[in-house]
Amino acid sequence: MVVETGLCPGMIDPEARRVLDAELREVAGFVAANAFPPLPEAEIRPRLIELIRQRTARFQAAAPGCDPSDSGRQDAAEIARNLARPGGQAAVQRMIGLPRLPVENDCPQGST
């Protein structure tokens, strides 16, 4: 969604884009700090850029162009706008406010 809102002009306004960019950097920092082992701060930006590059390539290959009549894109735009609003910003802050390890299966078989 972040890639799509950046590639499709007019999907969100510049202020919402600025807020989403800042939130993305905060979430990336949270994920890096809570990774095991933690990702050094110097590696966060290069990895984030590479991830965005990969997602951009996938987006462009799957859906070249930006058709504003596409309801899926409109849904993505509304989600992005909501995340950029105060309530969405608060939700992101709540999500990254509690440190945790990235556990895919927190209840392994056979544990009590």
Image (cartoon, rainbow, N blue to C red):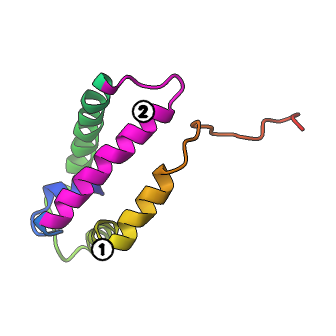
Question: Residue drawn 62% across and 37% down?
Answer: 103
Residue 28 is covered by the magenta coloring: yes
Q: Is residue 104 visible?
A: yes
Q: Is residue 3 above or below residue 13?
A: above
Which badge, 2 or 1, is on the more N-terminal residue? 2
Task: Say which element carries label 2.
Answer: helix
Q: Nearest the camera: 9 or 62?
A: 9
Q: Position of residue 66 (x, y in %)?
A: 15, 63
Where is the C terminus found, in terms of image quarters? top right
Q: Position of residue 80 (x, y in %)?
A: 29, 66
Q: Which residue is mark 2?
A: 32
| Amino acid type, label 2 | Ala
| Amino acid type, label 1 | Glu
Residue 78's mark? 1
Residue 23 is covered by the magenta coloring: yes
Distance of label 2 from label 1 (alpha carbons):
28 Å
Q: Nearer the viewer, mark 2 or mark 1?
A: 2
**Magenta segment, prevailing SS (helix, strand or loop):** helix
